[in-house]
Image (spheres, rainbow, N blue to C red):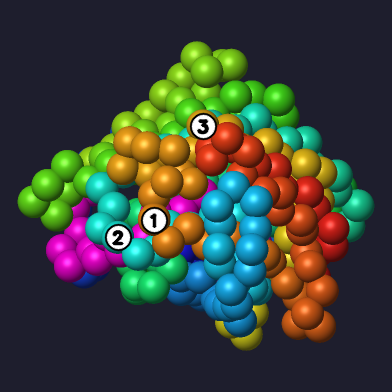
Amino acid sequence: MARRWGILLALLALTMGTALAATSASASVPGTSGFRPGGPVHLVTGQQAALAGGIRHQAQSTNWSGYAATTGTYTSVSASWTEPAGTCKSGDQYSSFWVGLDGYNSSSVEQTGSDVDCSGRTPKYYAWYEMYPNPSVDYSSTVKPGDHFNASVTYTGSNTFSLAIADTTRGWSHTITGTLAGAARSSAEVVVEAPCCTASGGILPLADFGTVSITGAEANGAAFGDAGGVTQIVMIDNNGRDKDTVSSLSGKENFTATWLRSN
């Protein structure tokens, strides 16, 4: 994936055959001006592990945590979550929560979600979509901690995707249609992310989001745990320490992630 910055790039012509129709506009995000867009998941290791809920594989990543289905062809993914409150003490930090197709073992990502970012001591909340490698687009609709989100990404045929997100607490929703030639549709994921990239290409610090609860996760219209080849992803820092914890899948559809450290 994933959540990309490069706000100035949003004004450039879309590349890689992508044509997007949307009513939203890009918005400024703290500390991101001039950052270079990154790539999909940054995997470190993967190992077989007997996990609860029928999950048989675990991977480590420097930028993703959550769950990915990786052994089929995926046409839809959806989930719900409650926007967590950010604890901001100093510096610019970022946490993204999203659903998407691709990015685990391919070079594109079609995704939509929300953020809690820190600009010094001030938390910033907003929702967005992205058809990576094109830059993300931020919605101007108000987001507050405690808001309930439903989000989905659906392949509708002919290289076309529908990306939908709704804040049911505030009563707004956005659906955009994007076309992307050559998308593999080789993975579906529900992810908490420390976005990329710093000026040197590194992962941005993970904002303290406390705990986020993901519910009703589905892929191809079925419970995520039944999607095939499901991998639990654990986010780690450069020293191999967990940056957050990811619970097992409850009911094959629900899990929590809890922040541990920024770097």
Residue 86 location (% of width, % of height): 79, 42
Amino acid type, mark 2: Gly
* Location of mark 3 (residue): 216
Report if residue 185 lies within the magenta region: yes
Separation (CA) of disc 3 from disc 2: 20 Å
In the foreground, 96 or 106: 106
Magenta segment boundaries in residue numbering: 178-197
Frontmost of labels 3 and 1 is 1
Separation (CA) of disc 1 from disc 2: 7 Å
- Answer left or right for 174 relative to 149: left
Secondary structure mostly taken by the magenta-highlighted segment of the chain: loop
Q: Residue furthest left?
A: 158
In the foreground, 89 or 97: 97
Disc marking residue 72: 2
In this view, 107 is above or below 94: below
Q: Earlier in the sequence, mark 3 or mark 1?
A: 3
> Are discs 1 and 2 less than 8 Å apart at CB?
yes
Residue 196 location (% of width, % of height): 58, 69
Separation (CA) of disc 3 from disc 1: 17 Å
- Answer left or right for 216 relative to 200: left
Q: Residues within 10 Å of mark 3 (few under 14, many from 20)?
A: some
